[in-house]
Amino acid sequence: MSSNIKDLIIVGSGMGGALTGVLNQDKETLILEKEPNLGGCASSFKHHGYYYNTGATTLVGYEENHPLKRIFDKVGYTPNLKRSSIAIRTIQNGKVLDRVKDFETFLKALDEVYYHPNNRLFWETIKTLDELFWQLKSVHYAKHSLKAYQKTLSCVWELYGTFKNLLFKEASSYINEVLPNISKEYQAFIDAQLLITVQSSSKNIPLLSMALGLSYPFHDVFYVNNGMGQIFKELLEPLNVQKNEEVLKIEKHKNVLLVKTRKEEYQTKNVVINLPIFESFKLFDDYDSYLFYEQFHAHEQSAFVVYLKIKSKEKFLHHYQLILNKQIAHTTSQAMFVSFSDSEDTVLSKDGYSVTISMHTNVNFWKQLSISDYEVQKHRTQTQMIKEFLACFETLKAEHIESFFSATSKTFQRYINRSNCGGHVLTIENMLRFPACTTPFKGVYHVGDSVFAGQGWPGVALGVEVLQEELKRRF
Ligand SMILES: Cc1cc2nc3c(=O)[nH]c(=O)nc-3n(C[C@H](O)[C@H](O)[C@H](O)COP(=O)(O)OP(=O)(O)OC[C@H]3O[C@@H](n4cnc5c(N)ncnc54)[C@H](O)[C@@H]3O)c2cc1C
């Protein structure tokens, strides 16, 4: 057993764990990561000599008023980024729409592809709500102590003061009001964009979530040079990080928490868990924890990702969204998100483009298959996805593909201990029951995209700031 008591142990080096780690590097902090690669869903890895991003390929939120920028600035870290001039190109039935930052340019292009007389009103409202949100001063959501509830209440008060009745409005009813008789194609475009950012279509989500989800291309969207994993390598360089060390159990003792791995037993006063909250019951054997974690249920949504190495002299944008008319086997949406490595990236684009194509899929489907059927079905989905991808890029042919393989929810489970991927969807119904970073147990906290505030860099960084406020009371 390690003799000294750590101030803080962080279980996992995903976005949430890593950002919490750097903010607490002045303390005796230890990060334990199961994998050799840091970053979880946002890591990068090497496969047969080529590098790929595991999941996340875009970075948003490196700008004023955003938590990610505040955190990086606070610790003096400058990421190696390249701005994507076009955040994402959407292709649907041969129609092309570029999501660019400049509002008037975007609106003009939108009117050409999805005309509606109220387009300006709709998108101006969406953009304004997003801007107002990122200017809020006291975003907070925590439970299990009087102070936490007080801070949360004052945040709700500020939210209400800012958004008034729009705060409780449903996204779908807002669409029906402002964009009456919206075409099927236009609705599919909106829903496909939302699926990337909020993991849900416009049904059931609040208007504010829709505004935040649809507005990301109005911000600076960045490509991370040398792979997303590079950020974690650089950020965590000065910290005490143990890779290849999976936490198996956490025991709660009177004055200390015992964190057990196969190699060591560490003592700490505080632990931040970066596993999804609904997977965290596995770490505890006591009955109180069982009762607490039992209330959180994993959603069934996950990702199917095809990884390709493509040799081509063509120039590509960083990101495309291909909205299909047909259903690809074993996927749950009709949109593919495609990311190309930047042609000047000396790591990812060495010997060709590193490309990922991702779609949504259902965890339960992959879980119930036999080993042999699993391979057959995986192959089927992969083949159909590659075929549709090639159909959208006239100049690309099968012979340009040097290497390909794919990941299902089972693959994500094997590597990073989570079969569901993407954040926890904030719906109208679960708004007040949403998991928080705090738990009823002294010194036990959560961070990441399964607890407040959301997925991806902007959401997870915001959640990290909320957690940091709560942690301050412990140190
Ligand atoms: C296909 C895909 C594409 C995406 N694209 C984008 C994008 O372009 N931009 C964006 O901002 N977001 C994107 N996202 C979302 C984003 O990647 C996630 O929301 C975010 O990375 C989740 O971070 P997290 O803090 O929850 O940690 P996770 O990524 O869940 O990481 C948790 C870490 O904990 C480790 N761990 C698990 N169990 C243990 C244990 N017992 N002991 C020790 N370590 C453990 C894991 O190995 C992992 O490293 C994408 C997600 C997916 C799946």
Image (spheres, rainbow, N blue to C red):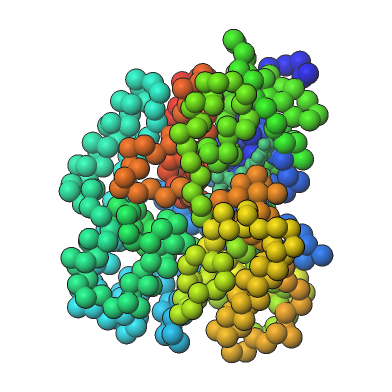
User: Looking at this rendering, what residue extends furthest in the bottom direction?
Assistant: 394
Residue 292 percent coordinates (x, y): 48, 27
Q: Is residue 315 above or below residue 162?
A: below
Residue 4 percent coordinates (x, y): 72, 16
Residue at the spot 57% in from the left edge and 85% down from the top edge: 391
Residue 402 percent coordinates (x, y): 76, 77
Is residue 336 found left or right of 131 in the rendered image?
Answer: right
Is residue 369 found left or right of 243 in the rendered image?
Answer: left
Is residue 98 found left or right of 305 in the rendered image?
Answer: left
Image quarter (top left, top right, bottom left or bottom right) of the N terminus: top right
Q: Quadrant of residue 434?
A: top left
Q: Is residue 73 above or below residue 146?
A: below
Q: Quadrant of residue 185?
A: bottom left
In this rendering, the count of numbered labels is: 0
Q: Which one is nearer the viewer's eye here, 212 or 136?
A: 212
Residue at the spot 50% in from the left edge and 32% down from the top edge: 294
Residue at the spot 55% in from the left edge and 41% down from the top edge: 276
Q: Which one is nearer the viewer's eye here, 315 or 327?
A: 327
Q: Is residue 391 above or below residue 83?
A: below
On the question of residue 271 being in view, the answer is yes
Residue at the spot 49% in from the left edge and 49% down from the top edge: 299
On the question of residue 342 being in view, the answer is no
Residue 213 percent coordinates (x, y): 39, 58
